Image (spheres, rainbow, N blue to C red):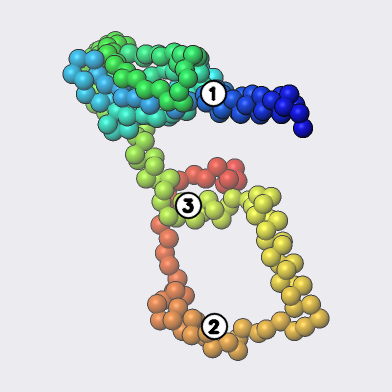
């Protein structure tokens, strides 16, 4: 091999080595558009943490809440507008820069107290005292939410509603599949008779001792099921 050819091969080897070194030293670009957005939500006057602040994105809606210490961490997209909403505070927003090179972005958000205005209530007296007595005795006062929940959650009302509620498609299909599987399991065979099972007799005697077969008086419930037939 001549000296000129050897010098050309050596120069090509040095060029490839330097190119590989420069490519390895080049910092890779971050093409991921999503980043982790973290921070604290504090009051503007006393710098106290604000819990349960709704954090919404302009693209995806509600994306998270702040914890008891006012800290939050949500995943957002670069360039998104993030809104901070709380009932007692003035709503605020923050725009995520679209020129970030890091995959994390942190802020401290300050929110000011909001003034809530309620509608005016006018209280007027009845013209006669006898009308007050009549209204106080005969007025049908509707149940409050707690009383309605108590009536709806009575055991008898729930049992009655479940008994009158028709089976949906999934329940009917599951019952049919279980019955079909039991028939196929004992195909061309005599199914077992449970009246000869000692376990079944033991369960029967225990239920008899507990009084499960005694006639129970059920209290009539005031709950009206939506599935009851109209009269």
Q: Mark 1 or mark 2: which is in front?
A: 1
Instruction: Farthest residue to the right: give it.
Output: 188
Q: Which residue is mark 3?
A: 158
Q: Earlier in the sequence, mark 1 or mark 3?
A: 1
In percent of width and height, residue 213 lies at 47, 75
The kind of secondary structure element at disc 3 is: helix
| Mark 1 neighbour class, 10 Å CA radius: few under 14, some 14 to 19, many 20 or more | few
Q: Nearer the viewer, residue 110 or 1?
A: 1
Q: Earlier in the sequence, mark 1 or mark 2?
A: 1
Alpha carbon separation for disc pair 1 and 2: 78 Å
In percent of width and height, residue 61 lies at 50, 23
Residue 39 shown left or right of residue 1 in the figure:
left
The kind of secondary structure element at disc 2 is: helix
Q: Quadrant for the N terminus, please.
A: top right
Instruction: Farthest residue to the front: give it.
Output: 2
Q: Nearer the viewer, residue 11 or 199?
A: 11
Q: Which residue is mark 1?
A: 26
The kind of secondary structure element at disc 1 is: loop
Alpha carbon separation for disc pair 3 and 2: 29 Å
Residue 106 placement: quadrant: top left
**Which circle marks residue 200 in the picture?**
2
Q: Mark 1 or mark 3: which is in front?
A: 1
Q: Residue at x 65, y 49 (%)?
A: 168
**Which circle marks residue 12 in the picture?**
none
In percent of width and height, residue 222 lies at 43, 47
Q: Earlier in the sequence, mark 3 or mark 2?
A: 3
Q: Quadrant for the C terminus, please.
A: top right
Residue 171 shown left or right of residue 141 in the figure:
right
């Amino acid at each position: 091999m001549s000296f000129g050819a050897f010098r050309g091969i050596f120069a090509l080897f040095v060029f490839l080595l330097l190119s590989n070194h420069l490519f390895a030293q080049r910092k890779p670009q971050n093409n991921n558009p999503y980043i982790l957005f973290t921070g604290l939500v504090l009051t503007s006057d006393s710098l106290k943490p604000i819990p349960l602040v709704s954090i919404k994105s302009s693209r995806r809606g509600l994306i998270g809440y702040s914890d008891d210490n006012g800290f939050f961490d949500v995943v957002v997209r670069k360039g998104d507008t993030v809104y901070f909403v709380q009932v007692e505070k003035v709503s605020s927003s923050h725009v995520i820069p679209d020129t970030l090179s890091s995959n994390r972005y942190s802020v401290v958000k300050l929110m000011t107290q909001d003034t809530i205005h309620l509608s005016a209530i006018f209280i007027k007296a009845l013209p006669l005292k006898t009308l007050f007595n009549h209204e106080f005795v005969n007025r049908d006062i509707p149940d409050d939410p707690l009383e309605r929940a108590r009536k709806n959650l009575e055991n008898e009302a729930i049992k009655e509603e479940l008994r009158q509620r028709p089976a949906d498609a999934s329940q009917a299909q599951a019952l049919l599949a279980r019955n079909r599987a039991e028939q196929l399991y004992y195909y061309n065979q005599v199914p077992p008779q449970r009246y000869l099972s000692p376990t079944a007799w033991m369960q029967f005697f225990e239920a008899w001792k507990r009084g499960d077969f005694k006639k129970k008086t059920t209290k009539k419930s005031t709950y009206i099921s939506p599935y009851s037939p109209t009269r």
